[in-house]
Amino acid sequence: MGASSALTTEENIRTEVRTKRVRVSEFFKDFDRLRSGFITASQFKRCLNQNLRLTLRPHEVDDLVDKYNTKGNGMINYRLFSDVIDEDFEPSKLNEDPKHQTKVPMEYLGTTRSLQPSSSEVSGKVKDILEKVQNYYTYHGVNIRTCYEDFDKHHNGLVTRSQFARSFPGPPDVTEDEIELLAGHYQDPTRPSLCNYLNFHNDVEVIKAYANEEKLNLSKSDADIMNDTFIDRLGNIDPDLRTTFEKIRVAVYKNGIRTTEFFRDHDKLRSGIITENQFVCGLSLACGKEAQLSKSEIQAIAKHYQTEDGRVCYKEFCDIMESIFNVPGLEKHPTVHPLRPPRGALTRNLIALSKEEEDRVESILAYIREAVLKRRLMIYPYFKDYDRGIAYTRNVTKSQFARILHFLSLTVTNEDTGLLCRKFEEPISGDVNYPAFCQAVDQEFKHYTIDAPTEPPSSTYVPPEQPRTISTAHINLNDLLARIRNHALVNRVRVVEFFEDFDPLRSGSISKAIFQRGLNSMGVTKVKEDQLKALTDHYVDPKKSDCVLWTRFLTDVESVFTQPNLEKHPTLVVPPHETFHLPKQGACVNWEVESEDLKSSYDEAIVRMFSRSNQRRLMAKPIFQDFDRHNNGHVTKSQFRQCLAYLDLHADDDEVAAMEKKFSDNIGFNYLKFLDELEPRERQEPKYPAHLKELQAVNAFKKPPEIDALTDLNSIIRKIKTKVCKERMHIYEFMRDYDKLRTGRILVPNFRRSLDLAGLELKESEVHILEDAYRSYENPDFVDYLAFQDEIESIFTIKNLVKTPLVQPTLFKPPVEWEQNELTSEAEIVFKQAMDRLSEHVRKTRTQLFPLFEDYDRVHNGSVSRFQFHRVLSELELGSLLSEQEFRVIFSKFKVRIGGKDDVNYIAFCDSVYELAAIEPFKP
């Protein structure tokens, strides 16, 4: 019982491990420092539960421990367990295909096959129906699973018989009886009223895979034809002509000759046929010299491909030459093994001599071979020293060949030397092939070897293994998309940047592999294979079944930031970002539904720790931060226990388990949330809403009344002229941009805007007076700004002065501001008495007024504030001569408006005092 249970447990572990794409051995090595292959039983259990996150029952874990306790000393052979689970192919078995050495695990999450038993006749009919519908589904890109998903509310792969028939996706020639036969065949054994459409989908996919494999794998006869030798393709021809073809194919292959290029210029119509003379010329140019073809051999080849009208079909000849050692259309048949010539078969062949000459050459080589063996000569380096051309040609001239033989004291007559040169002569250059000569006379020197020809691999069709289907019925697509949206929101990811570069035509469709690559680039790396398949199936392109509509995915994910086409629906309420935030995966979502024992253990522990933390004034956060190397607010469970021990916050196992249950997720233990309950802090209310209400209340009041606003048009014009004259500005530059057609009129709002841009500092009532004065008679909504501009520009010159040259323009002088101040008759008497008193004191004491005022005038605009004016008079011992009323009168007389406030023009004040005192300024 234990052995069979262990085998079943291993199959389940293998299935789950393959699904998670992990290697079991990597999790055990950390406990095996010496790499002995053994760890303790507790470490083995810890790896299965914590690291691999496998949900195993206690008796299943015990069966595994008993099975892999090979030594009987309590140490578990994890290396043997890893080999059984991983089941990798053995590198030593090189003669066996690695894919046949691995075992395919069962499908994950219970998608095993459950079919109603049926007779062979029914099975045959079902197979015929499946083969018929498969072609239709492949051509139209129909996915059976998506056709039934809307009826499968529980995502268990089951629908009713009526739903199965209603959503059957064709083709039209399938009758109702055949559909009923399929429904009965795929009926669930445990629930007779339901049909398993996933089994129907998987069977069609398997047949589709077989069909695709058959297209890629050729039949035995076709493969034999392609893999036959070059000569067999020529058929039964004359042996001499066959030898000629052998020479041509070697020359074409060695020199990389494209034979078609030498004939196509003669074939203007691309008919594949040229004249005999054109064929002879083209073949001579292509490989006549390289293949050493004579005229008779070329004529024989032309005669072989000659047509009835006397012309030559060069296309057939070129097709054979272009694929001498290759298979035409190999990119469409990647599993075909082309025939390759054995190593050394294409080396330089020696020239054939007559029988008497061959016998003489053999006797000469035997003499040289005996001398080389007896004297132990290494003759190859002597020849190589003469081969110092631009390229390593492996050739020497005939004179160099004779000189080397003489240098080595190999006595050969001139006639024998010439015979050797003829035997090892290169056909094209006429030089001597010295490596071939060295191999002929030196047994230890190997220039080239010819391997025995190998048989091409068998092209017998091997049916592919049944592809592993991935069930997505259990996947909740809404939860998966919510996780991706949360990732994009938290990390502020712009999804479009990871996909648009792969869609240069902006078609909105990319392949599934590129879609997966884009998800990995986004950081969505913890998506399982079944989740990825569900995602790609949901966004599959209806026109291309192997592509994904990434623009739809983009719209669904980026809805966390804003809604599309929001400009068309301005009243649409966009949900806040907080609604899309999700807790970490694996976190406790609802603590209230947990057991009462767990919640009571947690409450007791947190109350006790809170009291102890307050009494001792603990700072717990730095302790946890020392373990948080990634600064993500998480530590491991073991580190959490260690931190509690450092802080002297003791808790039993049940209490620690309760806290881990509440604050743990897939990353680890969230100590920040734990500290929020252990060390709660007062929540600070945001001050921005209150400040916003205060601003809104202030802005709700009416505008303050205007101060010193002018009510006369002439006064307003004079004020503007004074401003323009002082700052030398051009009013027209601020208004012409609003008059694109140069009509001389602009809208009233634009007139106000241009006055504000000019910085004229006009009150609202003053602007209204100007608008009324220069309003257009033709259209009351416009203002004649040119008339206003002419009036203002009159301070510089008179308009159309060229037509009235005798008119003398008067220069506008801006009035002095302090001179515009008017006092009452009583105030004039007080002002005169105060100024007489001050001038008399200055005349007697000869006081200099300017230097002290200039110290307070930092910007040198000739004015100081009222407080500074009073202070300077006090420092000059003039303040005691004036009463408060006299001081106010003097200020009213010499006040000027600077930057929106009233200052004192001390220059005018000093000049008036010096004038009354009859003193020249700046003189002692």
Image (tube, grey):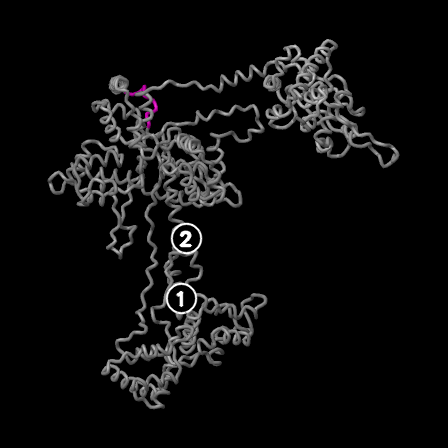
Q: Residue 690 placed where, x, y %?
A: 49, 16
Confirm whether the magenta stretch covers residue 590. Answer: yes
> Do the CB atoms of the residues marked 2 and 1 lie less than 8 Å apart?
no
Residue name at image x 43 percent, y 43 percent? 512
* Label 2: how many Cα within 10 Å (few below 14, some 14–19, many 20+): few
The x and y percentages for residue 244 are 43, 76
Q: Quadrant of residue 683?
A: top left
Q: CA distance from mark 2 to mark 1?
A: 23 Å
Residue 787 shown left or right of residue 897 in the figure? right
Kindly give the residue lying farthest to the top in the view shown.
Answer: 826
Q: Is residue 802 above or below residue 327?
A: above
Please tell me in which quadrant of the rendered image residue 57 appears.
Answer: top left
Instruction: Give neighbour class at mark 1: few <14, some 14-19, many 20+ (Cα, 10 Å).
Output: some
Instruction: Determine whether the residue tagged by mark 2 lies in a helix, strand or loop.
Output: helix
Tell me which secondary structure the magenta stretch mostly adopts.
Answer: loop
- Give how far across and how far down residue 82 sits, in percent: 22, 43
Front position in the image: 844 or 121: 844
Q: Which residue is mark 2?
A: 215
Looking at this rendering, what residue extends furthest in the left direction?
72
Quick one: SS at disc 1?
Answer: loop
Q: Is residue 868 left or right of residue 71?
A: right
Give the numbered dot on residue 325: 1
Q: Residue at x 33, y 33 (%)?
A: 188
Name the kind of residue labelled 2 in the image.
Answer: Lys
**Residue 562 shows up from this direction:** yes
Q: Position of residue 390 (x, y in %)?
A: 43, 73
168 and 746: which is toward the camera = 746
Q: Residue type at mark 1? A: Phe
* Residue in view at x 42 percent, y 62 percent: 327
Q: Which mark is residue 59?
A: none
**Segment colored magenta:** 587-594
